Amino acid sequence: RKEVEQDPGPFNVPEGATVAFNCTYSNSASQSFFWYRQDCRKEPKLLMSVYSSGNEDGRFTAQLNRASQYISLLIRDSKLSDSATYLCVVNAVTGMDTGRRALTFGSGTRLQVQP
Amino acid sequence: EAQVTQNPRYLITVTGKKLTVTCSQNMNHEYMSWYRQDPGLGLRQIYYSMNVEVTDKGDVPEGYKVSRKEKRNFPLILESPSPNQTSLYFCASSLMGGRARGEQFFGPGTRLTVL
């Protein structure tokens, strides 16, 4: 089982739609969570951190469910410019070895917003 | 402008010919890391460094070396490249703190092909 699992998609949605991605993680010691966005052939860029109480940044809402070990990303009113791959990232810091396996990346979910 | 730079951006080489990919950041970050990205496998950490002269293996270190002689630079060395090292490579940097380490800044990537 992968440590961080995402539906690879692609999710094809019309402009203006609301779309949600889920991500599950297997390490219960995971401490912090993030969503990154990666455009085709470009570097990943941090989209938002995910906080325990859930957080919102404009049209983007992130949620964390520690009991079920998943995080979600909701995008409202999709724009063409939202087309990208969204990477779920988990930071598991275990024991004294605080550097090892700092971040585990999911393989990403591809979103294609269509006119 | 805060940034992570990598060179070269594209490289085609032959099996066994030593190469170095440079990485430099201007944000005074302590933590630097190298990843490779392969289809369906997501980003996997090769090596990381928590500060000058402090480096350690990530998930897939075989066939790679790194050094951290200065805070800003973190070169990736392939002593004897093989075709299975054909991949897209990213360098990243961040501050050291727990959540801060999840907020990584990535370089533009180096696409390496080993024939």
Image (spheres, rainbow, N blue to C red):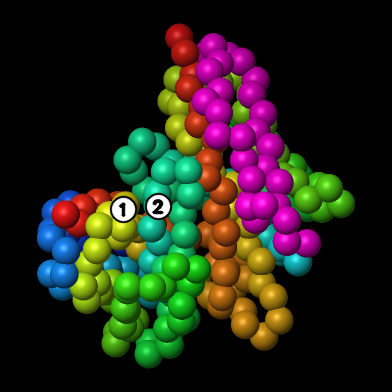
All told, the count of numbered labels is 2
Q: Kindly identify which numbered label has been placed on residue B37.
A: 2
**Chain to which mark 2 belongs:** B
Give the amino acid at mark 2.
Answer: Gln
- Say if labels 2 and 1 share a chain: yes
Q: Residues within 10 Å of mark 2 (few under 14, many from 20)?
A: some
Residue identifier under label 1: B87
Q: Position of residue B25 (x, y in %)?
A: 31, 68
Residue at 45 percent of width and 20 percent of height: A80
Magenta-colored span: A1-28
Q: Is residue A66 left or right of residue A4?
A: right
Examine the rendering and report whether any part of residue B47 can be seen: yes
B85 or A65, nearer to the observer: B85
A60 or A94, nearer to the observer: A94
Residue at 34 percent of width and 43 percent of height: A42
Examine the rendering and report whether any part of residue B2 can be seen: no
Give the amino acid at mark 1.
Answer: Ser
**Chain to which mark 1 belongs:** B
Q: Secondary structure at mark 2?
A: strand
| Residue farthest along the right direction in this orientation | A67
